[in-house]
Amino acid sequence: MKICKEQFSVVNLEQFGHNGWEWDITDGEDVNSYRTNYFGEGLWQYLPSNVSSRNPDGSYSPVYEYRQILGTGQFRLSSNRVAARKAIRRFFNV
């Protein structure tokens, strides 16, 4: 199934730290969470870690954490919300 570009959207763009950002990208079903550092540099994605936590019923669930996927010299967003949203849309092709 081919997914059209128009189905993806950037949602919940929120300031993180001094000049950083935290946002979600959704295709209507799945949501992927991303953020920069406090200064708008680098790119982290919210992913399952190698650690699991034990639930009250005895089953295990993965623990999620932000993992850096691009360095601070490779990705940077403006402190301006409109410019940051445009840069996110360009970078992720959404």
Image: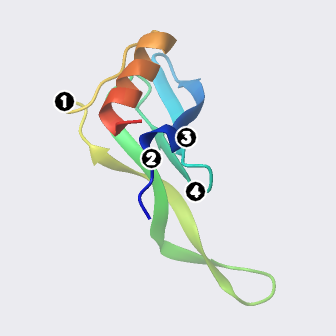
Q: CA distance from mark 2 to mark 1?
A: 31 Å
Residue 25 shown left or right of residue 28 in the figure = left
Q: Nearer the viewer, residue 8 or 81?
A: 8
Label 3 residue SS: strand
Q: Which residue is mark 4?
A: 30
Q: Residues within 10 Å of mark 2 (few under 14, many from 20)?
A: few
User: What residue sits 23% from the left and 39% below the top?
Assistant: 71
Q: CA distance from mark 1 to mark 3?
A: 22 Å
Between disc 3 and disc 2, the foreground one is 2
User: What residue sits 62% from the left and 56% below the top?
Assistant: 29
Where 73 falls versus 48 (above or below)? above
Q: Position of residue 18 (x, y in %)?
A: 49, 16
Q: Which residue is mark 1?
A: 73
Which sits earlier in the primary sequence, circle 3 or circle 2?
Answer: 2
Between disc 4 and disc 3, the foreground one is 4
Residue type marked 2: Cys
Which sits earlier in the primary sequence, circle 4 or circle 3?
Answer: 3
Which sits earlier in the primary sequence, circle 2 or circle 4?
Answer: 2
Q: Quadrant of the C terminus?
A: top left
